[in-house]
Image: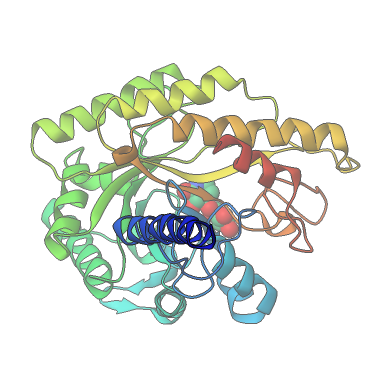
Amino acid sequence: MKIQKLSKHFVFLLFFSCLLQACKSEETVTPIPKPIGTINPDTIVKKDSTGLRNVSPFPFGAAINISTLKSSTIYRSTVIREFNSLTPENVMKMKNISLGRGQYFWDDADYLIAFAQANKIRVHGHTLVWYNSTPAWITNFTGTTDDWKAILHEYILAVVGRYKGKIQSWDVLNEALNDDGTFRDCVWLQHIGIGYIDLCYQYAHEADPNVLLFYNDYGTEYSTAKRTALNNLVADLKSRNVPIDGIGLQMHININRPNSTIQTAITTAAQTGLKIHISEFDVDVNYQKLATLTYNTTLAAAQKDKYKITTKAFFDLPASQRYGFTFWGVYDSQSWLSTATVPDWPLPFDNDFNKKDAYYGILEGLK
Ligand code: XIL
């Protein structure tokens, strides 16, 4: 009887240890990945505490104001925590860099690059050629077509060459189209002819064959003519093997922009097969420029909806075409839309760097 009881015990123990063994061997078959630091579920760019590991479906970025970057600790820490791409708001524009033929001001652009490198953040260069950023010495320049080509060549080679390997992509040409789809007048068009567009891309490619080259513009969410002209321009460049990799849709919209037009702008540009960058996103609340307007929950909700649907429309693109989503600034009062007399609230952070409803709209758009 005693022996029988003992053997029952033994069988039970044997069964239990086999079960344990089975569990153990299963554990070795499918190892559980070790977490790398803590990932914050409540941020749009999910960085971990050690390696800045990003698990967002695409990069998020912001246009960076150089003087705030230099002076504000909370601005810097917000940028480091929240973004994995950045665009210089002004310091890489021709008017800021080009002081004269062969004379350049690099300090601010270098500072921004150093900040990005130290914090493992991608830099999107903005912008090599923009009609609205032409230094006086170029406007006043006189010379033959070849002389004009030479100054364009020198400038692009100097800038793209300096940041070769440090900048991942450039807005080569900014706003070269009018809203009616015709080519915008500028000194380059006047002195070189329409071929200046090809040259901008060819020179940039010559300076850094690995950098991604973008065309950047606004307004395709409200102008059908511009939407068509943009795709025609890209097709034309591609047909002549001019190197172009992406389209930047600035997306300066306002709280009343119909959702369908935002979606159409994104899907139409994507038909080119190029990478798409939502490059200067902001949602103007006070687009009627009322000095007395105050921000309230109704406006915040309308704005949140635009953040959400634009994020979602972008997220719906094939992964290979989602280059990134960049806000034109970080916090409201610093936006180019906010002035001393006319307030505005276009960005995801308020002036105390708190996340606004708009920010949570982005998170909802990513679900
Ligand atoms: C704006 C900047 O935000 C301002 O600070 C500056 O005074 C003018 O340029 N489209 C562009 C951006 O491509 O470069 C512009 O940035 C906004 C419109």
Quick check: 103 left or right of 145? right
Quarter where residue 284 is shown: top right
184 left or right of 234 in image: right
Relative height, residue 33 to residue 60 (above, below): below
Task: Report the front residue among 194 and 362.
Answer: 362
Q: Report x, y in % for residue 79.
A: 58, 66
Instruction: Give the tally of numbered discs.
Output: 0
At a point 22% along the width and 43% down the height, the residue shown is: 197
**Residue nearest the observer in this picture, 80 or 228:** 80
Q: Residue 92: horizontal and vertical position, in percent?
A: 41, 65
**Residue 335 visible (yes or no):** yes
Looking at the image, can residue 65 be seen? no
Residue toward you, 114 or 241 = 114
| x and y percentages locating residue 231 in the rendered image | 29, 26
In the depicted structure, whether residue 147 falls above or below residue 305 = below
State the quadrant of the C terminus: top right
